[in-house]
Image: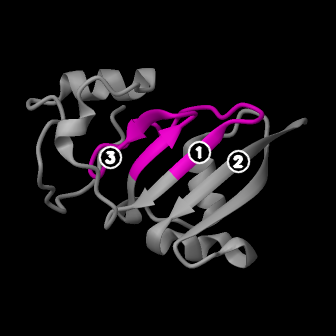
């Protein structure tokens, strides 16, 4: 089975999952995964738990936020770029208007009562959005 190469950027405390690529505040690594692998597979390979992952971007498109992770089934393609921020790295809610999002994220935010526009998060569990 062919592999895909993913350009992964880990920010904040998540940099420690980058192994030798850990630069303290970030890590950048290339990860080879079997074709058809998903974000969930990537997180598993890295050892990152769902409750540690905050805002995530796939190719510059918002794909997940704390408590809303509809991208777990997103299939990764060769040369995709994935940026994963720790929950301590928050993105001000007012900047979310007009942000490019993955299809999964658009659907999940549309289903949220507040459309995902709130400024605080409670640790009440994580949903996959499926």
**Secondary structure at numbered mark 2:** strand
- Compare marks 2 and 3 and give the one earlier in the sequence: 2
Q: Quadrant of the C terminus?
A: top left
Relative to 14, 99 lies left or right: left
Question: Residue 7, which numbered label?
Answer: 2
| Residue visible at 28% across and 57% down in the picture | 90
Magenta portion: prevailing SS class = loop
Relative to 67, 10 lies left or right: right
In the image, residue 79 above or below residue 45: above
Q: Quadrant of the N terminus?
A: top right
**Secondary structure at numbered mark 3:** loop
Q: Quadrant of residue 111?
A: top left
- Asked if one can make out residue 68 in the rendered structure from this viewpoint, the answer is yes
Q: Tell me if mark 1 has few (under 14), some (14-19) or many (20+) residues whose alpha carbon lies within 10 angstroms of its own.
A: many
Q: Quadrant of residue 4?
A: top right
- Compare marks 2 and 1 and give the one earlier in the sequence: 2
Question: Residue 62, which numbered label?
Answer: none
CA gap between label 2 and label 1 equals 6 Å
CA gap between label 3 and label 1 equals 14 Å
Q: Tell me if mark 2 has few (under 14), some (14-19) or many (20+) residues whose alpha carbon lies within 10 angstroms of its own.
A: some
Whether residue 62 is in magenta: the answer is yes
| Residue visible at 30% across and 45% down in the picture | 127
Question: Are the residues tagged 2 and 1 within 8 Å (C-beta)?
Answer: yes
Relative to 45, 127 lies left or right: left
Q: Position of residue 22 (x, y in %)?
A: 65, 75
Question: Residue 65, which numbered label?
Answer: 3
Question: Residue 82, which numbered label?
Answer: 1
Query: Which range is magenta?
Result: 55-83
Q: Position of residue 57 (x, y in %)?
A: 48, 41
- Compare marks 3 and 1 and give the one earlier in the sequence: 3
In the image, residue 112 above or below residue 45: above
């Amino acid at each position: 089975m062919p592999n895909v190469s993913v350009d992964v950027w880990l920010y904040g405390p998540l940099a420690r999952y980058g192994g030798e690529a850990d630069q303290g505040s970030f890590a950048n690594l290339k990860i080879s995964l079997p074709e058809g692998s998903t974000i969930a597979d990537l997180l598993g390979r890295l050892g990152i738990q769902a409750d540690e992952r905050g805002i995530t971007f796939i190719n510059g498109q918002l794909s997940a936020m704390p408590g809303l992770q509809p991208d777990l089934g997103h299939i990764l393609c060769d040369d995709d770029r994935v940026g994963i921020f720790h929950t301590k790295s928050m993105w001000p809610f007012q900047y979310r208007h007009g942000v490019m999002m993955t299809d999964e994220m658009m659907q999940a935010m549309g289903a949220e009562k507040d459309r995902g526009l709130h400024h605080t998060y409670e640790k009440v569990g994580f949903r996959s959005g499926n």
